[in-house]
Amino acid sequence: MHANVSKVLNENGITFREIRHDSFSFAITSPMDFANALGYSLDRITKSVFLRSKSRDKYVMAVCSMSRKLNFAELATLAGAAKLEVAEKQELAELVGYPVNGVCSIGLSPAIQVFVDEALLTFPTILVGSGEAAVEIELSPADLAEISKATSTNISL
């Protein structure tokens, strides 16, 4: 887990479980493998997608279930942008500091708007990236939204 993510979780007294992909007796090569290893629905495994406006004046982190698609038009409206697109890897590294396969909405700059899909709030816990590849965090979706200073709304299709 990235040190920044761990710091935010611990400073806020958040109950969580760290799950390393290499702790399983078989390779985790996909979100479905991970869900199956835990005995969870794919709906509880999330993706965090870093987006930007075309003019690069607005940045957004969107968190939704792996089983759903992000509604880019709705996210653009929420962010006050004409259009959003997936940010480049270089922007992710520079502005977020987490690797592509470890993206997390925790511990981001306040300049990055965070949106959590409200469908996730129906689960007792969800799995999110930890800021480190092949390591996930299980925590309550309400806690994720709170410590990410996220807006919870319908952002998926």
Image (cartoon, helix red, strand yellow):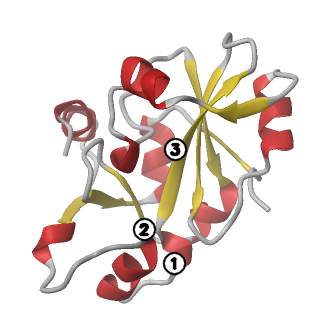
- Tell me the quarter of the image containing the C terminus: bottom right
Q: Choose mark 1 or mark 2, whichever is in front.
A: 1
| Residue denoted by label 1 | 42
Q: Nearer the viewer, residue 14 or 117?
A: 117
| Residue denoted by label 3 | 145
Q: What is the three-letter code of the residue carrying label 3?
A: Ala
Q: Secondary structure at mark 3?
A: helix
Q: CA distance from mark 1 to mark 2?
A: 12 Å
Q: Nearer the viewer, residue 156 or 25?
A: 25
Q: Nearer the viewer, residue 65 or 146?
A: 65
Q: CA distance from mark 2 to mark 3?
A: 12 Å
Q: What is the three-letter code of the residue carrying label 2?
A: Thr
Q: Secondary structure at mark 1?
A: helix
* Label whose residue precedes the other's in the sequence (1 or 3): 1
Q: Residue at x 67, y 64 (%)?
A: 119
Mark seen at residue 125? 2
Q: Residue at x 35, y 77 (%)?
A: 34
